[in-house]
Image (cartoon, helix red, strand yellow):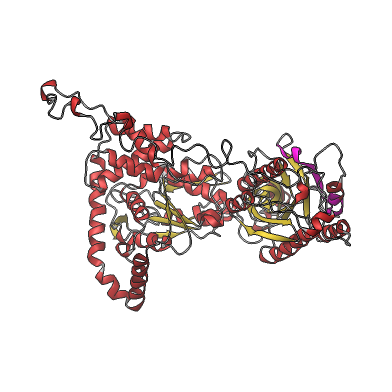
Amino acid sequence: MVYPFSAVVGMDDMRLALLLNAVSPAVGGVLVRGEKGTAKSTAVRALAAVLPPVAVVAGCRFGCDPAAPDPACPDGPHPTDSPAATRAARLVELPVGASEDRLVGSLDIERALTEGVKSFEPGLLAAAHRGVLYVDEVNLLHDHLVDLLLDAAALGRAYVEREGVSVQHAARFLLVGTMNPEEGELRPQLLDRFGLTVEVAAPREPGLRAEVVRRRFAADADPDGFSARWAGEETALADRIAAARELLPRVVLGDGALSQVTAVCAAFGVDGLRADIVTARAAIAHAAWSGRTEVTEDDVRVAARLALPHRRRRNPFDAPGLDEDTLEQALDDARPDEPEPDPEDTPPEGEGGPADDSPDDGGTPEQGAGDGAGPDEQAGPAEGGPGGDQQPTTAPRGDAADPDAPRAEAAPAPEQPAVAPDEAFRARRLEVPGIGDGVAGRRSKARSERGRVVGSRRPEGTVTRLHLVDTVLAAAPHQLARGRSGPGLRLAREDLRQADLEGREGNLVLFVVDASGSMGSRTRMAAVKGAVLSLLTDAYQRRDKVGLITFRGADAVLALPPTWSVEAAAARLTDLPTGGRSPIAAGLLRAHETLRVERVRDPRRRPLLVVVTDGRATGERGTDHLRQAHRAAGLLQAAGTASVVVDCESGYVRLGLAQTLGAHLGAQTLRLEELGAQQLVSTVKAAA
């Protein structure tokens, strides 16, 4: 059973964004972001049922329109009198683990070379033509597949290139992606390619939540009866979509509305001009959906709220959204000037004219009610006078504090409030040595399906990437035996060579951050957080999985289990309190256990351990904490964990403890100030 679109409770923005794209697929698709269990997939699957049916050329695998068949269709050319058939609009789902050939289609390279036959098997893009292409968990899809998907959506065509053999076909579809931000974000470049985006969340009103449960139970108990009860609304919705599509070519975007579109985009400082184009198209679609032939200010307002939130982000950790005051101000500034009133229509003084504007309480307009500050607002700064936000502190500052002093034994150092991180910078790239075989990313070298050719091998199964030169060289010695008499080359199956490609993979970057009192002043902790935030930004851009372990006081805490949500790691880091002792051994042991579990869960993803500390291991008296830390480091080195130590020690006198810890880890040690991108690539030394 497909749940009726009209029966979805609430989610007004999501439903409107989907309907606008149904009216005008040129808007560019919808990205639905939200927590799990918010009917994202249910609404998308229900949309296809209310789309108008499509007429296709009978027998065409690419869904050509009989009225205007694609002249480049691989199943064509279709004559103008080709028999036609009518079918429902398709909903095609792209699985996260799909290959490039499954998405765009594939050529039979072997038949093309040996028999000269161009045999093409259509992919999901062909199946979705003139329908809906749905990608659940689009943020987990490989980047190169997302690029291909969005290129096809923008161009309306799919291209397949294989060793000089080229096939293309029409691919116009409504693209819908859903994602849970907790599992990681899309890169800003990919976010920008989606026309509209909406944020969804479960309703907080008990009455709405009860209605959701009530309808879900009714649908499960009697699917046919439930669908029948909503059939009228579904039919009306389908008719309205069809009417809006017919009206769409007649909708006019006037100069005034266009000025408001561009003013709003400029006010939010979005990059490029795609935002202006998408907002204009969405406003036109909204006008058609509302039954109007001219775009109004309300259409522009609705379109901006859907088209701009994901385009105003300036760094990966900015939350999407729009400031309503800025939106309204931009619309007001671009609103056409109203004509001057006729003086004859101005009422005389004493009858509502300008002289009758004094407030009732006798005060001046500047002192009218609501304009002045109340008693609380007239007060000075916060309690404590100027600089009231500064709090006195009795904790010692600098590296001179000894956490092992008797005073600390009697009363442990108090926890300091969280320190805001310094501004992030462009971090250098840290690599895991060797060649991996993990998922596509942008950090370490790996064997992959995309990248530069580094060699060839005999194929195991279907040839997907032919190494043409090595294939010819393999076939050359056998030409006489095969009876070649002309200039042609005789090829056999055993001559074919599959190209080996070297690309980049994503890694698991596990941060182990020292938050103890030995890290010194709040200024230095702010610098440490800024450096780690920079590395997190780099991990986000390189499609890495990240985790965060912090240690202070008596133990280490897995603050964030390995996840794709770099935003969650940044939030935990920003809110991290400091103070107390430095249980480095506990932090390293927790990292060892975390990586052991992750190797079982995701064996292909190679880890990179980043330890941020000054190397001062402290704790209860009577224990050699430094030796314990070195033993824990030895466990990680024995496991072959690639590591890097970020030395946070400062001051004129340096003990070099972080350098020693790095030696026990078999790691490269970098000073905090060396994390910038002056040297863009730094390969981590592998453990022996």
Is residue 183 or residue 68 the one in the foreground?
Answer: 183
Residue 255 versus residue 68 in the image, above or below: above
**Can residue 233 be seen at all in this image of the molecule?**
yes
Vertical relation: 53 (above or below) 451? below
From the top left corner, tell me how far across and down residue 409 is, in percent: 81, 58
Kindly give the residue lying farthest to the left in the view shown: 344
497 horizontally vs 644: left or right: left
Q: Give the residues in magenta.
A: 661-676
Q: Is residue 636 left or right of residue 484?
A: right
Asked whether residue 135 is drawn in magenta, I would say no
212 left or right, relative to 659: left
What quarter of the picture does the C terminus occupy? bottom right
Relative depth, front residue between 78 and 509: 509
Residue 391 sits in which quadrant?
top right
Q: Quadrant of residue 528?
A: top right
Coordinates of residue 385 in the picture (x, y in percent): 56, 37
155 or 487: which is nearer to us?
155
Rendered-image quadrant of the N terminus = bottom left
487 relative to 58, above or below:
above
Residue 105 in sight: no
Is 34 in front, or is 457?
Answer: 34
> Residue 343: x and y, percent?
14, 21
Please give the name of the residue rendered at 36% of the width and 57% of the height, measured from the top-left corner.
11
Residue 520 place in picture, x, y as percent: 76, 45
Identify the residue shown where x is 38% and y is 42%: 324
